[in-house]
Amino acid sequence: MNTAQLEKVRSGTGFIAALDQSGGSTPKALKLYGIPEDDYSGEDEMFDLVHQMRTRIITSPAFDGDRIVGAILFENTMDREVEGRQTADYLWNVKNIVPFLKIDKGLAEEKDGAQMMKPMPGLDELLDRAVEKGIFGTKERSVIKLPGAGLDAVVAQQFEVAQQVLAKGLVPIIEPEIDIHSPRKAEAEDQLNAALLDSVNQLGDDQLVMLKLTLPDTDNLYKQLVDHPKVLRVVALSGGYSREVANEKLARNNGVIASFSRALTEGLTAQQSDEEFNATLDQAIAAIAKASAT
């Protein structure tokens, strides 16, 4: 493990940029960016366009290591280049931003009020490639709609995958997202908090994980996790809240930093001049970094 990256993730100021929309959510991301679906045909063209969008973000002077701790990439982005260097190499060695990789293959059907991760048959091979390319950690997402047995199953699966990631010397970002529209959100959050504390307490002495959580109804609900010696960092997802609302909620949760995707790119379009694009991105980054500093 890269100790400089570990230190940056542990104590760096700013937040983690989530640039990891994958196949299913890419058309929506491109549409918000001002590129409608009839502007491209097939997956190859779609991924070329989304890589252009991500390259524009990553190479922007606004996207800097003083305000951005890390960036989460989708596998396709990890395998491509930015300005002639592999993306992870560019992020760390040019921008001083720690690279992470999204490894899940999407969500399974809902069962018991939750969606677990689909099976990941090629995970070991993907993790080996990630290590080779200089990736520091991974991210894996599940979704919880209601408290109950499904929530416990999600946490168990997350920690099982985390063990596979840890075995390769990578740091997993465990993401059991609670749907912000859940009618029993606060109740699910209490159950999740207890389940996560129980799970991190069982980690080995030298094992560190990160947690990516929905902003809770009760401010500082996850304080014990933020302070936990086995938890490298707790980050928050925007989960469908607007950037403004997400930032307000985030600022009230001390020690938690952002890991926003849609809330980060809100307002960016392909049609903007570089000047407009960079100014819009700069404002977004400044606001999210400020909310992450509390």
Image (cartoon, rainbow, N blue to C red):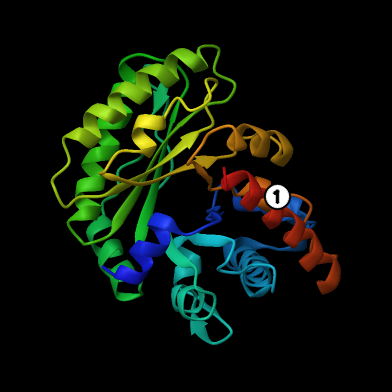
| Residue 130, quarter of the rendered image | bottom left
Q: Quadrant of the C terminus?
A: top right
Label 1: how many Cα within 10 Å (few below 14, some 14–19, many 20+): some
Q: Residue at x 35, y 13 (%)?
A: 148
| Residue 278, quarter of the rendered image | bottom right
Q: Is residue 221 visible?
A: yes
Per the image, label 1 sits on a secondary structure element best described as helix
Instruction: Give coordinates of residue 257: x percent, y percent.
Output: 52, 46
Circle 1 residue: 287
Against 64, is 93 above or below? below
Q: Please identify the residue farthest to the left as the structure is shown.
A: 204
Viewer-closest of 141 and 110: 141
Q: Quadrant of the N terminus?
A: bottom left
Viewer-closest of 286 and 239: 286
For residue 249, side relative to residue 279 (left or right): left
Q: Is residue 135 visible?
A: no
Q: Residue at x 16, y 35 (%)?
A: 202
Circle 1: residue type: Ala
